[in-house]
Image: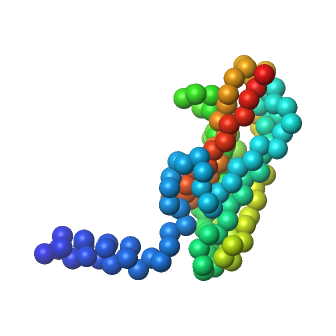
């Protein structure tokens, strides 16, 4: 009987949600998230610059809460190898932060490794930049860039 009540409670909770802001985790394209590399030429990790834009695609004002002063994160990968993960490289203050977005409103985060990436030259090839909000249920958006 308890199991049935638990299942019904969970189903009721999720059925009461009109829209969830994160729908397709790990996709390269996402209506709510855009990632654009803005650096002209990348030779070392410190040259990587990008804009990560998050848009409220719901029809209601939404507040996004974070357990620290960091609200977004990003990774640089070459194939399956993670070369840089901002979650381990940057220190965040242990304070609760948040931001609100009206329907259709966007917030853009600058990704800039000039103060955190390596000075070593990157090998030629294709690299992937991933960006995400630092919430438990965040989607990830990614884009690729070339190093010649």
Q: Position of residue 55 (x, y in %)?
A: 67, 65
Q: Position of residue 123 (x, y in %)?
A: 72, 19
Where is the C terminus found, in terms of image quarters? top right
Left or right side of 138 for 42:
right
Residue 60 visible within the image: yes
**Residue at left offset 25%, top offset 71%:** 7
Left or right side of 68 for 114:
right
**Residue at left offset 24%, top offset 73%:** 6
**Residue at left offset 81%, top offset 26%:** 43
Q: Is residue 86 above or below residue 122?
A: below
**Depth check, front residue: 23 or 2:** 23
Q: Is residue 62 above or below residue 126?
A: below
Left or right side of 117 for 60:
left
**Depth check, front residue: 29 or 39:** 29
Q: Is residue 55 above or below residue 33?
A: below
**Residue at left offset 32%, top offset 72%:** 10
Where is the N terminus found, in terms of image quarters? bottom left
Dividing the picture into quadrants, the one containing residue 56 is bottom right
Dividing the picture into quadrants, the one containing residue 21 is bottom right
């Amino acid at each position: 009987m308890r199991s049935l009540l638990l299942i019904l409670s969970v189903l009721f909770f999720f059925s009461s949600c009109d829209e969830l802001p994160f729908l397709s985790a790990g996709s390269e394209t996402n209506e709510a998230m855009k990632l654009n590399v803005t650096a002209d030429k990348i030779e070392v990790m410190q040259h990587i610059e990008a804009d990560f834009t998050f848009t409220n695609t719901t029809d209601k004002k939404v507040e996004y809460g974070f357990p620290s002063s960091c609200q977004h994160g990003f990774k640089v990968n070459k194939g399956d190898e993670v070369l840089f993960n901002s979650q381990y490289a940057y220190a965040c203050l242990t304070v609760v932060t948040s931001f609100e977005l009206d329907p259709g409103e966007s917030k853009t985060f600058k990704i800039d490794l000039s103060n955190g990436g390596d000075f070593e030259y990157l090998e030629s090839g294709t690299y992937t930049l991933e960006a995400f909000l630092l919430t438990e249920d965040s989607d990830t958006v990614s884009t690729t860039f070339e190093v010649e």
